Amino acid sequence: MKILVTGGLGFIGSHTVIELQNEGYEVVIIDNCSNSSEDVLVGIENITGKAPIFEKMDLRDRSKVTNFFKKHSDIVGVIHFAASKAVGESVQIPLTYYENNIGTLVYLLQELQEKTEASFIFSSSCTVYGQADELPITEAAPVKPAESPYGNTKQIGEEIIRDTCKIAPQLKAIALRYFNPIGAHESVEIGELPLGVPQNLVPFITQTAIGLREKLSVFGDDYPTTDGTCVRDYIHVVDLAKAHVIALNRLIKNQNKSNYEVFNIGTGTGSSVLEVIQSFERVSGEKLNYAIAPRREGDVTAAFADTTLANNELGWKAELTLDNAMSSAWKWEQKVRNT
Ligand code: WQD
């Protein structure tokens, strides 16, 4: 069966393509390479022995999207990763984020609702919860007013899918609310490739350790947490990728309980920034150069998932540990810098 993966050359997308191919699916990737490289196709083929079909295309080009679905009319499912995802940048250029993240979602859904049957997996984010009132966070936790246009595009995206599924019973959809994806495939053939200065913690740690960055700034140690630094649910990207395949299988096999479902995808465990640093130092044997810095605007104190629904309904549970993830992230950084 043929599956479209938009943004399939990206960090989470490429790891999901691996797991889809392992499951026996035929994969078509659409990516405009604005935040990824075609070299990732080589990594995928080195891992699975099979190069996915790749079409370099911008989903904002409506006519190209229509022509694509005419050409690949045998697509049975779509996993939609393609989106702009930098929280800070979204504050600076909101309309670019709304056009790219919302406009392309609408175009994809307009094509899918014309099909007799279609399965759709949406890349959502725990950012929709903001600072949740209760921890761990369940799917019933209220969606809070977004703190950034990026987060708002995830909230609006979920609502668009929900409203479409209400009038299009032939469309089955699942939104996966990711917590913090980190790490790399054990083969070290693919991994996270942030362009420019990394905004996220783990690539900044590995780039500091490899000597690309002078030191890591820890954004605040005066939060009401065990050690004063923020707590997040860091999930290995391979565990996250596997959750996508399980969710897709659920829809294709019509095991879904309604035609729009939402699942938190995390480990269920919170780790502080200092605990992530300690994990890195443990697995790498490197001493990390870091300093406490002022808090970062918009950061929530703590967020980690209640994974009961995904465990029980999807039959999915994270298997890899923080140390696994930090070790793979470090091996990937060393590979990319050829050290
Ligand atoms: C994690 C922790 C920082 C960098 C964001 C988006 C989320 C998703 C993942 C797209 C925080 C601290 C970070 C640094 C630091 N993105 N930190 N020094 O903010 O939890 O989530 O990225 O889907 O939607 O909101 O991830 O990795 O940026 O930060 O101290 O140089 O690390 O303060 O506590 P975040 P992050």
Image (cartoon, rainbow, N blue to C red):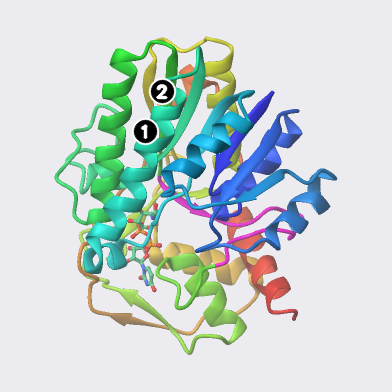
Q: Nearer the viewer, residue 167 or 316?
A: 167
Q: Nearer the viewer, residue 142 or 105?
A: 105
Which labelled disc corresponds to residue 306?
1
Q: Residue at x 30, y 33 (%)?
A: 158
Q: Residue at x 30, y 43 (%)?
A: 154
Compared to 335, does 209 lie above or below? Answer: below
Location of residue 104 in the rendering, given as x and y in whole percent from the top left corner: 39, 43
Location of residue 177 in the rendering, given as x and y in whole percent from the top left corner: 38, 38
Which labelled disc corresponds to residue 134?
none
Amino acid carrying mark 1 in the image = Asp
Which labelled disc corresponds to residue 309?
2
Q: Residue at x 62, y 44 (%)?
A: 29
Please state, as top left, top right, bottom left or bottom right, where the N terminus lies in the image.
Answer: top right
Along the horizontal axis of the image, is 267 left or right of 221?
Answer: right
Q: Residue furthest bottom?
A: 214
- Where in the image, quadrant-wise, is ligand 1 located? bottom left
Q: Quadrant of residue 300?
A: bottom left
Along the horizontal axis of the image, is 170 left or right of 151?
Answer: right
- Asked which secondary structure carries label 1, the reply is loop
The 10 Å Cα crowd at callout 1, few under 14, some 14 to 19, many 20 or more, is many
Task: Give the residues in magenta.
Answer: 179-193
Q: Residue furthest left?
A: 145
Q: Residue at x 30, y 56 (%)?
A: 97
Please state, as top left, top right, bottom left or bottom right, where the C terminus lies in the image.
Answer: bottom right
Q: Nearer the viewer, residue 252 or 147?
A: 252
Amino acid carrying mark 2 in the image = Leu
Along the horizontal axis of the image, is 136 left or right of 112?
Answer: left
Separation of residues labelled 2 and 1 (CA atoms): 8 Å
Instruction: Tell me if residue 237 can be seen.
Output: no
Location of residue 68 in the rendering, given as x and y in whole percent from the top left corner: 57, 37
